[in-house]
């Protein structure tokens, strides 16, 4: 049965980016691998390069074994908060491009995208400022 953990924002994980405190995100799960640094078969440098960030792609590119995936569960500390900056950014980018193509005939075509940009920025500030 999977362990229950805390919910982390990516900004919180980014604070743990050195050998004293090393957090990684793999598949939206947060792991504290600080005690595993010296034991990692690939060396601690590999983990420290990814420290404080999303290491999913690097983890999958290596092709870790089932045993490695089982060991990871010992270092699980929580889940990544579902609202991520990249999701907001991708949604906004699509909308902005769509609006610019459809309404690009004059300066009035920029009003809607700029308004949406402000709304997204304020929403992002609110979401990241609120406590979990």
Image (spheres, rainbow, N blue to C red):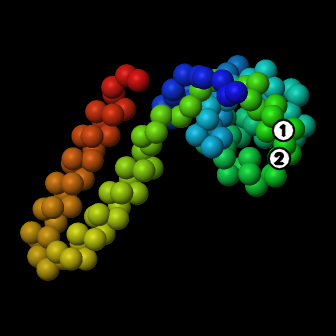
Which residue is situated farthest in the bottom direction here?
Answer: 105
Dividing the picture into quadrants, the one containing residue 14 is: top right
Q: Is residue 121 left or right of residue 132?
A: left
Q: What's the distance in space between the residues labelled 1 and 2, CA to CA?
A: 6 Å
Viewer-nearest residue: 48 or 81: 81
Viewer-nearest residue: 86 or 17: 86
Q: Position of residue 103 (x, y in %)?
A: 17, 75
Read off the residue under disc 1.
68
Compared to residue 83, the image places residue 94 above or below, namely: below
Q: Is residue 114 left or right of residue 18?
A: left
Q: Is residue 18 visible?
A: no
The quarter of the picture where the C terminus appears is top left
Read off the residue under disc 2.
64
Q: Position of residue 110 (x, y in %)?
A: 16, 66
- Residue found 67% across the figure and 28% down from its top: 2
Q: Is residue 70 visible?
A: yes
Q: Position of residue 64 (x, y in %)?
A: 83, 46
Residue 3 is labelled as: none
Which residue is situated farthest in the front direction here?
Answer: 1
Viewer-nearest residue: 83 or 44: 83
Compared to residue 103, the image places residue 33 above or below, namely: above
Q: Is residue 94 left or right of residue 13?
A: left
Compared to residue 96, the image places residue 7 above or below, namely: above
Q: Are marks 1 and 2 in contact (CB under 8 Å)?
A: yes
């Amino acid at each position: 049965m999977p362990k229950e953990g805390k919910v982390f924002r990516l900004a919180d994980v980014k604070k743990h980016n050195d050998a004293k405190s090393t957090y990684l995100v793999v598949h939206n799960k947060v792991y504290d691998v600080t005690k595993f640094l010296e034991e990692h078969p690939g060396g601690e440098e590999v983990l420290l390069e990814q420290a404080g960030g999303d290491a999913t792609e690097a983890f999958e590119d290596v092709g870790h074994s089932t045993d490695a995936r089982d060991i990871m569960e010992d270092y699980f500390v929580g889940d990544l908060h579902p609202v991520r900056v990249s999701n907001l950014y991708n949604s906004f980018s699509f909308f902005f491009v769509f609006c610019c193509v459809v309404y690009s005939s004059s300066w009035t075509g920029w009003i809607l995208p700029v308004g949406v940009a402000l709304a997204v920025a304020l929403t992002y500030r609110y979401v990241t400022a609120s406590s979990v």
